[in-house]
Image (cartoon, rainbow, N blue to C red):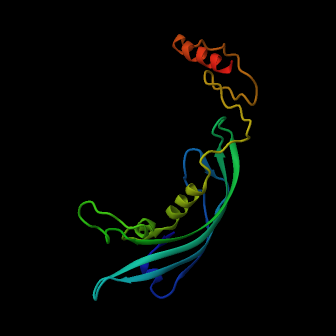
Amino acid sequence: MLITPLQLEKEPLELDEKLPELDYAPDVRQVKPLTVTGLAELLEEHRGPKEIVQDIRLRAKYSGDFEVLCARCLDPVPQHLEGEFDLLFRPGGVDGVAGEHAISEAETEIGYYEQSGLVLEDVVREQVLLSLPGRTLCSEDCKGLCPSCGQNLNQGSCDCADRTVDPRWNALADLASRMKS
């Protein structure tokens, strides 16, 4: 869904959308349509007698079901996500200043939209990815995959022979045994 400043000039736009499956990341899959409700409104920033910047403020809530791959065994783990956001978007290039310059903390909270408008799916995708935990496990005692053959060790052991240890590690093994005693 494209949100344009022209749509918002007369009145705010109420959002009540069910977004189909979006592409997030290789290890994240949306299971059902994502519900998004909220409000998009136009804020005019007067920068002088003739310069008006049209910012889009987007306040919304989202809710949906996902599958995230376990960080150890790669099995899908169901995740229900809910969140809300209040974001400000400005037309791209409006704040363009040649060269490097310092920005204020408030400016780090501003996003930018293209001349055609703001794509709701892009905003929601970013918010979902930010709300996911950094690492997902199917269980705390997940054994993961065998590094040699790739067998899921939660489903059974593998037939890989014990890997030979590089003799350069013997000094550390000796140190570890001395520290225990």
Query: Relative to 157, does residue 104 appear above or below in the rendering?
Result: below
Instruction: Tell me which corner region of the image, top left, top right, bottom left or bottom right, holds residue 18.
Output: bottom right
Q: Quadrant of the C terminus?
A: top right
Q: Residue 50: horizontal and vertical position, in percent?
A: 28, 87
Query: Relative to 130, does residue 43 appear above or below in the rendering?
Result: below
Q: Is residue 144 left or right of residue 49?
A: right
**What residue do we see at 66% from left, 41% from top?**
70
Instruction: Tell me which corner region of the image, top left, top right, bottom left or bottom right, holds residue 156.
Output: top right
**What residue do we see at 67% from left, 35% from top?**
73
Q: Residue 47: horizontal and vertical position, in percent?
A: 32, 82
Q: Residue 41: horizontal and vertical position, in percent?
A: 50, 80
Q: Residue 39: horizontal and vertical position, in percent?
A: 56, 77
Q: Nearer the viewer, residue 164 or 102?
A: 102
Q: Nearer the viewer, residue 145 or 24?
A: 145
Q: Nearer the viewer, residue 101 or 51?
A: 101
**What residue do we see at 36% from left, 70% from top?**
115
Q: Is residue 97 left or right of residue 73?
A: left
